Image (spheres, rainbow, N blue to C red):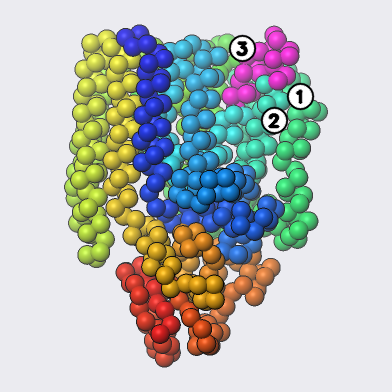
Amino acid sequence: MNLPVSRVFLGVLALVALVVGIDNMERPLANPDEGRYSEISREMAASGDWVTPRLNGIKYFEKPPLQYWATAAAFKAFGESEYTARLYVGLCGLATILLVGFTALRLANVETALAAMLVLVSSPYFMALGGIVTLDMGLTLWTTATFCALLLAENAVDRPAGRRRWMLLAWAAMALAVLSKGLVGIVFAGAAVFFHLVLTRDLSILRRLEWLYGGAIFLAIAAPWFVAVSAANPEFAHFFFIHEHFQRFLTRTHRRVEPWWYFVPILVFGFLPWMFALVSAALDAWRSTAGSRALQPFRLALLWGLFIVAFFSASGSKLPAYILPAFPPLALVLGRYLAHAPNRRLALWAVLVVPVAFLVGWLAWRYPETAREPWSRAMYLDAQHWAVASAAILLAASVVTALLLRAGRRWNAIAIMAFASVLMLDCLENAYEHLSPRQSGQEVAEKMKPLLNAQTRAYSVELYEQTVPFYLGRTLTLVNYIDEFETGIKAEPARLMDLDAFVVDWQRPGDAVAIMQPDTLEKMKARGLPMLVVHDDPRRVLVRKP
């Protein structure tokens, strides 16, 4: 090694903490996921009801509560802010990186461990989702912990006490994965065991799974909330298990239909700047233990990561963040390859990123021309220089990395690429922050606050801006809007107001404000409602009662 492992490791982590942990986490929350999950946690902390999740005061059963609990606890401990809303997600991302490194160290060597961690740090997809409030990073941590504990248990097969501890940890991690995002936590764990059976052609692992004690640990962690929420809400079980799992996977009811190959470019570009090394790394991992019937951790990691991608590709509902759990196992595969592949081959993969950097720069330069209205174009122009700067960093890093690799300075090259990737991502985050007026309701919420007191009625008419209730610290009266609230409104129909009722309620004595889309405002004017516009843009209008 040209650089001490500890120095590279600590340097990368320090940069991650500085750039991602501080700069990235302060930007306004974005619609829809960041607003939705932050608001559910805020309401949970405010109400003290840790069993029934609510969004805008309405029952919301789409996902289990682990992240809500963690974020609500952060709000109570440190106050409500963008930082505390993203704290659990950021810690899950950091823990996943460390877990991958620890597992690679136990299964291989320090070089593979360092390279696998740097692969995740270099991944703009993984690192970006470490600063976005979705449930996918939490799921990723606990599914990765399940998988890694299984690998380490099988690696300790000749040490019964150690093997048992790791296997019981796998059961506990699987329970936390289920509490993060549902039954997929069990599906992924089952897939890992199945592929291990296929690779080793040995059924004895089934006797080593610690079914009795492991099952007891799993139920002790996962079952209490499901029992409690079902007892408190009779409508929960059918909606959560049937609608949110089987119907979401097998049908197109969620209107998130994408082609079967949708996740392929996300996977490839998600590993930028090592995207061109993916195929060689996969082939190298597959050939590494060909013919062996012993534990094959890197083959197993490859199969498990590809299974996750294939699983979500077969789903009738697709969103970009779904395949995040595939990145840690594939980082193990890529890390092993980066640690021992010929320097000249790695230099070639780095050089091939140069045209990608030019393409990113060209797209960033031309993107403002795609704006449909001056409002968006102005924001795109403000963001443009940051996006172009990210492309320039990628270009420079690719060239420098290739030159260092050609000179035989592998670890200098990999570390520089990791640093450059984090800086590139920070530039992109700064660019995205200029789009906040489009992506976040923070600005309109700040304009609402001076108009509100404890008696002011606040309505959301034919629109629900996910971030507005969080920034207001209160719920809104929902008017003629159902969408994701359908199940909660069926259980508590009084929480939805129709347009006719709103027209009457708006005109009764007392202060009132409302947020709506521009075309809804025109409908209200046509009905003769007195409304004074406080704020308007192409996406939403804020009005108050004169």
* Image coordinates for residue 495, horizontal then vertical, percent: 62, 72
Q: Amino acid at mark 1?
A: Glu
Mark 1 surroundings: few (<14), some (14-19) or many (≥20) residues within 10 A: some
Quadrant in the rendering for residue 183: top right
Q: Which residue is mark 1?
A: 210
How far apart are the alpha carbons under marks 3 and 2?
23 Å
Label 3 element class? loop
Q: CA distance from mark 1 to mark 2?
A: 9 Å
Q: Which residues are magenta?
A: 147-165
Looking at the figure, which quarter contains the C terminus?
A: bottom left
Instruction: Decide if residue 500 is on the left or right side of residue 539.
Output: right
Circle 2 — which element?
helix
Q: Earlier in the sequence, mark 1 or mark 2?
A: 2
Mark 3: amino acid: Ala
Q: What is the three-letter code of the residue carrying label 2?
A: Trp
Which label is found at residue 294? Answer: 3
Under tag 1, what secondary structure? loop
Circle nearer the N terminus (1, 3): 1
Q: Main secondary structure of the magenta part?
A: helix
